Image (cartoon, rainbow, N blue to C red):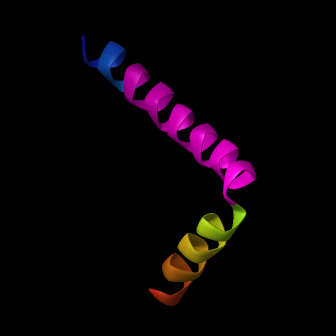
């Protein structure tokens, strides 16, 4: 059962990353702002 949950979590993570990539094409200014905010945390 844990293997199935782990696999589901990986697929959800991959889907979230792909959704962010597609969002970058739809709203590039927002994605640039988000990247700058993440970068400034370090």
Could you say which quadrant of the image residue 12 lies in?
top left
Does 29 sit above or below residue 18?
Answer: below
Name the quarter where the N terminus is drawn. Answer: top left
- Number of numbered tags placed on the structure image: 0
Picture coordinates of residue 36, whole percent (x, y): 59, 81
What span is in magenta? 7-27
Q: From this viewpoint, is residue 42 visible?
A: no
Horizontal arrangement in the rendering, residue 27 relative to residue 14 (left or right):
right
Does 18 sit above or below residue 37?
Answer: above
Task: State the residue at coordinates (68%, 42%).
Answer: 22
Residue found at the far right of this picture: 25
The question of residue 24 being in magenta is answered with yes
Task: State the residue at coordinates (69%, 54%).
Answer: 24
Horizontal arrangement in the rendering, residue 9 relative to residue 13 (left or right):
left
The question of residue 15 being in magenta is answered with yes
**Could you say which is closer to the camera, residue 28 or residue 42?**
28
Residue found at the far left of this picture: 1
**Could you say which is closer to the camera, residue 31 or residue 5?**
31
Could you say which quadrant of the image residue 15 lies in?
top right
Task: State the residue at coordinates (47%, 37%).
Answer: 13
Q: From this viewpoint, is residue 32 visible?
A: yes
Picture coordinates of residue 3, whole percent (x, y): 34, 17
Picture coordinates of residue 33, whole percent (x, y): 58, 76
Q: Main secondary structure of the magenta part?
A: helix
Task: State the residue at coordinates (59%, 73%).
Answer: 35
């Amino acid at each position: 059962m844990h293997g199935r949950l782990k696999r589901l979590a990986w697929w959800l993570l991959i889907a979230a990353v792909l959704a962010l990539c597609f969002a970058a094409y739809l709203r590039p200014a927002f994605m640039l702002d988000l990247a700058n905010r993440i970068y400034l945390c370090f």
